[in-house]
Image (cartoon, helix red, strand yellow):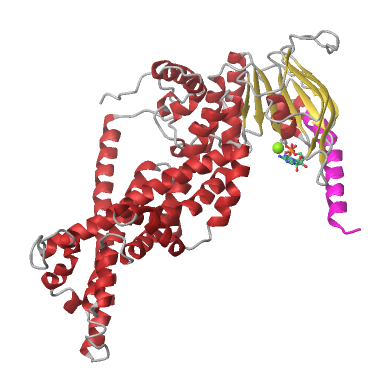
Amino acid sequence: MSSENAPHFSSKDAVVCRGVGKTWAAGTKRAHEALRDIDLDIKPGEFVVFLGPSGCGKSTLLYLIAGLEDATGGQIWSFSDKVETPSPERSLIFQETSLFPWLTVWQNVSFGLAIRGASQEERRKVAAEALQRVGLIAAMDKRPDELSGGMRQRVAVARALAMRPKVLLMDEPFAALDVQTRARMQDFLLDVWRDSGASVLFVTHHIDEAVALADRVVVFTSRPGRIKTIYPIDLPRPRNLFSREAETMRIQLTELLRDEVDRAFAEQEAFAVPA
Amino acid sequence: MAVVTRDGEPGAAAGTTSRPAAATRLMASRLFASMAGLDWLAKVWWTCLSISLFAGLWELCWAMGWADEKLLPPPHIFLGNIGEQGKYFNTATRWQVGTSMTEGPSAFESVLITGAATTMRVFAGLVIASVLAIGVGVLVRYYRFFDRLVLPTITLLSPVSPIAWLPVAIFLFGIGNAPAIFMVVVALFFHMVLATINQIDTVNTNFINVARTMGASKSQIYLRVIVPAILPGMLQVLRMNLFGAWMVVLVAESTGVGYGMGQVIMLARNTFNPSLVFFTIAVIGVLGFAFDWLLRMAQRRILYWLPDTAERLRVL
Ligand SMILES: Nc1ncnc2c1ncn2[C@@H]1O[C@H](COP(=O)(O)OP(=O)(O)O)[C@@H](O)[C@H]1O
Ligand SMILES: [Mg+2]
């Protein structure tokens, strides 16, 4: 690695963004800027939540960190490697089901090992371990369409865990679930996070979810997304979400977010009215 | 009673399975199976009813004297003398030196041989066209230069009617199975290439992104994600094209390309034999229906993960 333009950051950090920007369809008539000047350092084992109005570029930033899209400005690093391509070390979990319907649960979970040419025996073993961790060992030989939405997302988490990722990127993974299931899934995710020691980057637009999960909340501005504030949630775990402090934090986050949502709406209205 | 719990199963997920519960489930599944059997019977019943209604109307027209039996012979006439009709199907062996109309296979055998010959051509054409079309479609998306090189020609040729290819089939392959199969292939290939490309373009991008994050190479993504993902749509395309294949094969056979159902139709036309025409149409109908049914079964087998949308629509 060249040292002349080495960025200033600890090479141990899980994710480092320096001046990251993304313009979709850059250089064309339809070009539009989704992200601008993102500077962010995420430590190993840290739980960071991205909060912002919809369309502000949260998903875009996750895709950039995953290496699935190229940034049009700045640089992204992960554990001293420059992010240029996707890597099994950074697993992405999507909002909609992304399990392959033609594979059984265990085949889905061990898909990454199949790619590497692992034996069936080894794949089954690794899949069983990962499914054990998400409490779905009994569903091993089922097909995805036989599972509920919550179970499917747990399988998706197991599939990510089977790759032993250092960074888990989650794009509104529980948004499609009902409130009760979502609360259970949050507890489950915290357990998994503690066990795995991975950093988690979690996108949501639920303030409750942010306060329940995060070490730090990154609040984004409306599009083009910039970092408005990084808000620490220094509540001890396991958290009492009904405490005074938690309530105060929710109120403060709501206010931070409201300005941006208002601005996003105003922009959309201005866009809709012909000049 | 002892409750048997599967070991290693955390209670939260699927709960525990006890013997009585398992027994109940078994009974339920047996009951379901027998219901499914009834369902099948009901389908047969409705098919018979549908056909007899149609045939009955025709018979009625005949009985009332509206339909001239010389031109539109009703089912009981054209199906009544299978022995008589079957003779004309003897084309299967008539080309052999020394075989006259009265020699060779029996009437029933003749129908069977001729039907099998035509079915085989449809089947071979369908298989060849599918393999070629899926192969070319995948290559077009896989290699950009292949896309630029091949796609314009394919798009240009796809609206050409298969009839236009008939002389080419004869120039290239003369007489026999080959030209008939070629006709089926040519009639399906171009559309199926375009359909394959369209299927590839609509694969869920999440699937591809998941595979990319897991470190899959381009070829692995195509083999392990894109091909299985387009399979449901491709089987659908295949079923749609099946009937097209049946139509083309008749044209190919009737124009002197080998023998088969198309030849029989041509013979019936030249000898002014409406009975034979309708008889042949009935045989083709049954064959095509059976073929489609087989393909549907295969579809259900291969694409076990697809939900039954028709079932959903029925409750509306
Ligand atoms: N693949 C894409 N091509 C073009 N524009 C995109 C694409 N993905 C997202 N965008 C645009 O980028 C902006 C940010 O989108 P996104 O990152 O999905 O926002 P969020 O996840 O915060 O709701 C939106 O204006 C969206 O229309
Ligand atoms: Mg999003």
Q: Is residue B85 visible?
A: yes
Residue visible at 87% across and 48% down in the picture: A266
Q: Residue furthest bottom?
A: B65
Q: Relative to B287, is B60 above or below?
A: below
Q: Quadrant of the C terminus of chain A?
A: bottom right
In the image, which residues are magenta? A248-275
Residue visible at 38% across and 62% down in the picture: B248
Q: Based on the displayed image, in which of its 4 quarters is residue A219 positioned?
A: top right
Q: Nearer the viewer, residue B279 or B87?
A: B87
Q: Nearer the viewer, residue A15 or A231?
A: A15
Instruction: Estimate the x, y position of residue A230 in percent, counting from the top left.
Output: 82, 24
Q: Main secondary structure of the magenta part?
A: helix
Q: Residue furthest left?
A: B103
Instruction: Estimate the x, y position of residue B290 in percent, counting from the top left.
Output: 28, 57
Instruction: Estimate the x, y position of residue B44 in percent, counting from the top left.
Output: 25, 61
Looking at the image, residue A53 sits to the left or right of residue A121; the answer is right
